[in-house]
Image: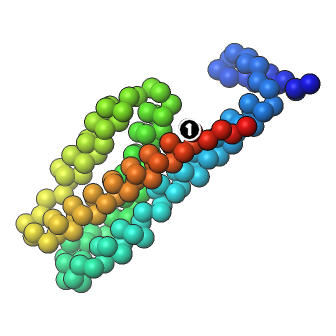
Amino acid sequence: MLEVEKVLFFNSFYVLNVNELYALILRAILLIILYFIAVFLPSPAISRTLNRFKKEVRGECGGKINAGKMIGYAERSLIYLIFLIAYAGTLNLASALNALSLIIAGKGLFRASNSRECTEWYILGTFMSIFLGTLITWIGLMIISTVSLW
């Protein structure tokens, strides 16, 4: 006989069997793991690519120490949040892609440079961050949604 538990959710009780409850907890754990992978995994690859620029360009274009890395974490967190909301069904894919374009446009407004090298360095870092964050989040959510947990 299956065990049944009552779970309080927004002032309403839902009846879940234990397997459904474990599957829900496991899915939440997988989403948290995916967040850390999507936000923090692309950083070393982006750093290695941007370090190929000449030291003069990095010195001239770089702002505060690790500020670009923190901005990358923030933009990949926003990307994850956008796709998580779309995964939950409250946002369609077209709206999620529109939100991505707002991130790109917002970053473009705050960064203007007279140096071509600085502009290329900045655009490369931004596009790599957005591409890798979107790719990892999208693939991870597709895997989580297709895996049968029980």
Query: Image quadrant for the C terminus?
Result: top right
Q: Check the image and report above or below for 52 versus 30.
A: below
Residue 56 in the figure: left or right of residue 148: left
Image quadrant in which you'd find residue 94: top left
| Mark 1 element type | helix
Q: Residue at x 17, y 66 (%)?
A: 120
Q: Residue at x 68, y 23 (%)?
A: 9
Residue 94 in the figure: left or right of residue 2: left
Query: Image quadrant for the N terminus?
Result: top right
Residue 58 in the figure: left or right of residue 131: left
Residue 6 visible in image: yes
Image quadrant in which you'd find residue 48: bottom left
- State the image coordinates of residue 24 (x, y, percent, origin top left): 68, 35
Q: Pick out the residue farthest to the right.
A: 1
Image quadrant in which you'd find residue 113: bottom left
Q: Which residue is mark 1?
A: 145
Residue 76 visible in image: no
Q: Residue at x 48, y 61 (%)?
A: 40
Residue type pointed to by label 1: Ser
- State the image coordinates of residue 138 (x, y, percent, origin top left): 44, 45
